[in-house]
Image (cartoon, helix red, strand yellow):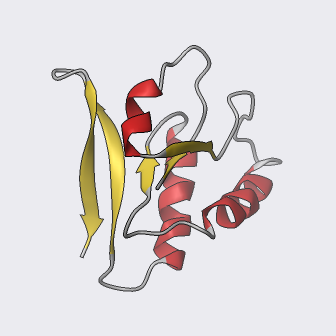
């Protein structure tokens, strides 16, 4: 299982997500979304998510909302209609990552 982290955040401890799988960062912390960078970010996102397995992998939502949106857009093209995939979000009350199923 792999946890695809939408964007690395410097200083953020993601160790709690390791119980869901190995972490793979899609976009590094120092990458900013601009008119000049957005097409490269989209292309890299498609390439990185090409091996995403919706039955066992997770998308951890982190970082710039535009990058999170690009990740959802890419998965929308990759997955079959009616198929679900899982995201991880931080539950600040329980102080842990929780899985949420999207689609279906």
Residue ranking furthest to the left: 93
- Residue under the point 24% across and 76% down: 104
| Closest to the observer, 22 or 7 | 22
- Residue under the point 41% across and 69% down: 54
| Closest to the observer, 17 or 42 | 17
Report whether residue 5 is seen: no
Compared to residue 95, the image places residue 36 above or below, namely below
Residue ranking furthest to the top: 11
- The answer to whether residue 57 is left or right of residue 70 is left
Compared to residue 37, the image places residue 104 above or below, namely below
State which quadrant residue 95 falls in.
Answer: top left
Report x, y in % for residue 88.
Answer: 35, 44
Label total for image? 0
Report x, y in % for residue 5.
Answer: 53, 42
Report x, y in % for residue 71.
Answer: 54, 56
Compared to residue 83, the image places residue 8 above or below, namely above
State which quadrant residue 19 falls in.
Answer: top left
Report x, y in % for residue 69.
Answer: 50, 53
Report whether residue 7 is seen: yes
- Residue under the point 53% across and 77% down: 78
- The answer to whether residue 80 is left or right of residue 35 is left
- Residue under the point 27% across and 27% down: 96
Residue ranking furthest to the right: 36
- The answer to whether residue 99 is left or right of residue 72 is left
């Amino acid at each position: 299982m792999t946890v695809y982290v939408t964007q690395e955040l410097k200083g953020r401890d993601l160790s709690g997500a390791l119980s869901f799988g190995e972490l793979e960062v899609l976009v590094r912390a120092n990458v900013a979304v601009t008119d000049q960078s957005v097409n490269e970010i989209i292309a890299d996102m498609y390439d990185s998510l090409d091996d995403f397995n919706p039955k066992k992998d997770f998308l951890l939502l982190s970082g710039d909302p535009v990058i999170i949106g690009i990740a959802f857009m890419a998965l929308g093209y990759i997955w079959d209609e009616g198929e679900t995939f899982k995201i991880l979000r931080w539950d600040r009350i329980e102080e842990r990552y929780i899985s949420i199923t999207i689609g279906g």
